[in-house]
Amino acid sequence: MVGIIELLVYLVTEMLIYLLAYSVVFEMEVDKSIKKWIFTLSIIFAIHIAIYYVYSPLDARGASSLSMLFLVGMLIKGQRRKKFLLYPIIIIGVASLVVGVSFAVGIILNIPEYSIVESSRLTILCQIVPIILMFILLIYRKIKKYEKIQLQMDFRQYLIFYVCIIATYVIMSALQMISEFGMSEKYVNHYGLATSLVCVVMVLLIVWQSILLKRELQYKKQNEMYNLYMKMQEDRVKEAIEHDEKLRRFRHDLKNHFTALNGYASEGDLNSIKKYLFDMTDDVKIYEYKDYTGNKALDAIIRQSLEQAKELNIEMKIVSTSIVTNRVAIFDLCTIVSNLLKNAIEACEKISCIDNRKIDVSVCSYESKIVVLIKNTFDGVVDIKNGKLVTTKEDNVNHGLGLGNVERTVKKYDGSIEFECKEGLFEVEIIL
């Protein structure tokens, strides 16, 4: 009975090592379904207990490298091809670490490494050390809130990985054979520990190189998307300014238009009046013209947003003062206001009750600082984590660009951005 308990404890530690390795090293998620866990553990335990009674305890432990494939298939989330391709790397990487610990234990207890392998209790002890190390690393990363970056590997990366793990396996096997049949135990344990550490470092370096490759590709893609977005943002500002200029010219020409209409009226030419008015309204829509901040580009963005809000039956109120932009580039300010208004309009558009669609906008200067405060009603859930707004849109990569650009721009000027959500009202305040 003691042997079975030791076998089950050994299997539990083996499972923990593999699951932690997938999670910590390769950033792959573990399934949390209780039914899957019960089913998987039952199958693995049953297989090893059968091997234990039919063959031997050592064979039951040795079969774990094959039975853990079932564990990976059932409990590790992600692409099936990828997680099984990584499995040999997990086995050898973990084995290098465990063998290194076993050689260290051999040095401490002054016994050969092979005697540790034959002892289930000492083997379990050697497996507990890597588990503790990976748990510490996992907790450290959660405390530091490191961004998860999964490995990006092509055929060459996998080839390098497999060559390294095969070489590692050959070296460790040779040392374990020497420990059992050859040289002085003292020297073998020291050589084995040093070699195991080198193998572990080699595997970790290759993993790190793959992480760097993934980051490089990720940053490259983000940079391309950012440049594309900034070009679109610049085009939007230009279009808004051009639109605003057209309105200015139209307003300037109103006197001439009225003169022409008066001429048709004096002649009683009603058809010409109708045609003239049709051409005027078709050429350009007449909006209420108002200066909000005294800056042509920023006022054009505000007026354009007002126009869009009006079309969507959204009540938008503007409170503003003249803005001095000596310290803040006007393009950056337009980027902030444009994106926040766009998000506010999109949130209000989703509200089914038209009477509840409201946006309050405040853009003011205060003691050489610029304060942007936007409040809007919303219908749904707003996710704020660690003081940051998390997008609820399905395409969070592309849709997150607007808010990301706002945050980067605020950071550029050492400004502050705060989000608040209460009673169906979302509020964002930016101070530059």
Image (cartoon, grey):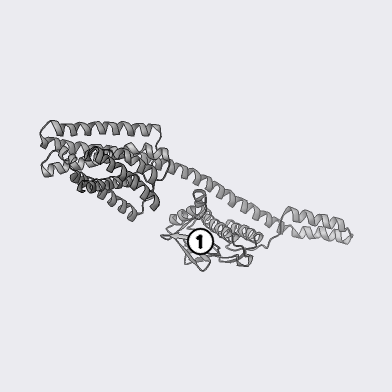
Pick out the residue farthest to the bottom: 423
**Residue 5 visible in image:** yes
Within 10 Å of disc 1 (Cα), the crowding (few <14, some 14-19, many 20+) is few
Identify whether 163 is placed above or below 309: above
Q: Nearer the viewer, residue 349 or 82?
A: 82
Residue 326 is situated, as x and y percent measured from the top left of the image, at 49, 58
In the image, is 151 to the left or to the right of 15? right
Name the residue tied to disc 1: 381
Q: Residue at x 66, y 62 (%)?
A: 289
Q: Nearer the viewer, residue 236 or 358?
A: 358
In the image, is 377 to the left or to the right of 20? right
In the image, is 201 to the left or to the right of 181? right
- Marks counted in the figure total 1
Residue 379 is situated, as x and y percent measured from the top left of the image, at 55, 63
In the image, is 77 to the left or to the right of 428? left
Quadrant of the image occupied by residue 347: bottom right
Residue 380 is situated, as x and y percent measured from the top left of the image, at 53, 61
Q: Amino acid at mark 1?
A: Val
Residue 360 is situated, as x and y percent measured from the top left of the image, at 57, 66
Question: Judging from the image, what secondary structure is the residue with disc 1 in?
Answer: loop
Q: Residue at x 63, y 58 (%)?
A: 308
Quadrant of the image occupied by residue 62: top left
Pick out the residue farthest to the front: 54
Q: Nearer the viewer, residue 237 or 92?
A: 92
Pick out the residue farthest to the right: 267
Q: Residue at x 23, y 49 (%)?
A: 5
